[in-house]
Amino acid sequence: MSHYTPVSQFYQDRAILVTGGTGFMGKLFNRIRKEQPLAVNKVIPIEGDITRPDLGISLSDQNVITRMVSIVFHSAATVRFDEVLKVSVKTNMVGTKQLVQLCHRIIKLEALVHVSTAYCNCDRPEVDEVIYSPPYDPEHIIQCMEWMDDDLVNTVTPKLIGNRPNTYTFTKALAESMLMKECGNLPVAIVRPSIVLSCALEPEIGWLDNVNGPTVIIAATAKGFFRTILCHEDKKADLIPVDMVTNLTICVAWRTATTKSDSITVYNCSSGIQNPITWKQFVDCCFRNIRKHPLEDMVWYPGGTIRSNSLVNSVCSTCMHFLPAHIIDILSRVFGKKPLLLWISWLAKFLAVVLLSHILIRRSKLFSGMLFSMWDLVLRVSNMLFHV
């Protein structure tokens, strides 16, 4: 295997373009800034906006990119589950299309890695590492968003997204199909993370900088005012730490550049089959750690129950969430304080019931054959390099 270039050597003296560097995954650069401050001088920020023509990149910066860059990581996207369809299409689809057009002009391009989501095909019972045919032609959707007004778009959105739970998964699915059509002979790979949570190891154990997805429910539970959720406790929780996703993405670019392929290779980055954990196990683990490391200003002792019956969950939600929230907010007004608890309770319910219910109740089986064959190769090469 002497002809292989190890990952540790592959990136030496390369120019790399990263979109979405200010997002959750991109902020892992913070450790480099702390431990190797001089290395930050290698990072050159450029002004850009994937919703604007030419990605909002100046002509001079485009010239530098097309001449110097050899690896592109595309992680810029809107990940809001409740994003309006027109914005989601412009960001996740049109932005991706424009990036591919830029990549066609890059002289020395060796790998374009597109970060998608494992739930872009959550309407399927099983998801293999392939790009599935979309329900609509992506170009037709883009054209419709250009002439439809906002009210009409909002009216037709439920019909368009069909069995998918939100505009995020819908546009990510269409973006994959569009990428396959537009990429031509470019060396492209797709990474599909499942539910991305805090770090396992890097830059610090448990680090995160947002309260998106399940994290907002965990935070609300830790405060004591979120106590019931609609979910099948025996369903697998496909959770993946953000640093594992980042490390995989880095290795995927290496694999794409060093192993030529005539088609797009897809990597489902998930844990549900190889290292499964159920939602009950996840919730029990959260409770143990919440009680071991309690937060300040709790309104109730942390606790709660997973319920599979929607009617029972609705009744419990009214009794345990909204009635206490109303009472506390009324007392807050009496004492001249800003009432926030009811709004937070509504937010937690919205995320849990409307946005996450499709994942918590229905679950696609994610197959990750390419992911683990690639990791096996990385480990074998590393073992030869370091004589482990």
Image (cartoon, rainbow, N blue to C red):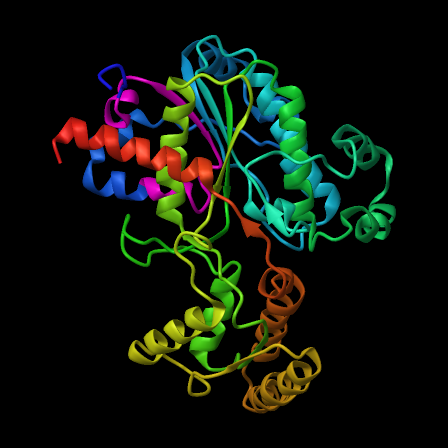
Q: Is residue 62 above or below residue 364?
A: above
Q: Residue 339, can we see it? A: no
- For the image, the number of numbered tags is 0
The quarter of the rendered structure image containing the N terminus is top left
Q: Is residue 86 above or below residue 183?
A: below
**Does the magenta run of residues contain 8?**
yes
* Front-lying residue, 364 or 27: 364
* Front-lying residue, 219 or 200: 200
Instruction: Give the image location of residue 205, x and y in percent.
Output: 28, 56
Instruction: Give the image location of residue 153, x and y in percent.
Output: 83, 46
The quarter of the picture where residue 129 lies is top right
* Front-lying residue, 25 or 263: 263
Q: Residue furthest left?
A: 387
The quarter of the picture where residue 370 lies is top left
Instruction: Give the image location of residue 203, x and y in percent.
Output: 28, 48
Q: Residue 103, can we see it? A: yes
State the extent of the magenta-drawn residues as a range: 6-29
Left or right placement of residue 42 versus residue 105 in this view: left
**Does the magenta run of residues contain 7?**
yes
The quarter of the rendered structure image containing the C terminus is top left
Residue at 46% x, 39% y is 369
Residue at 63% x, 40% y is 172
Q: Is residue 374 above or below residue 112?
A: below
Instruction: Give the image location of residue 14, x and y in percent.
Output: 33, 18
Left or right placement of residue 162 versus residue 36 in this view: right
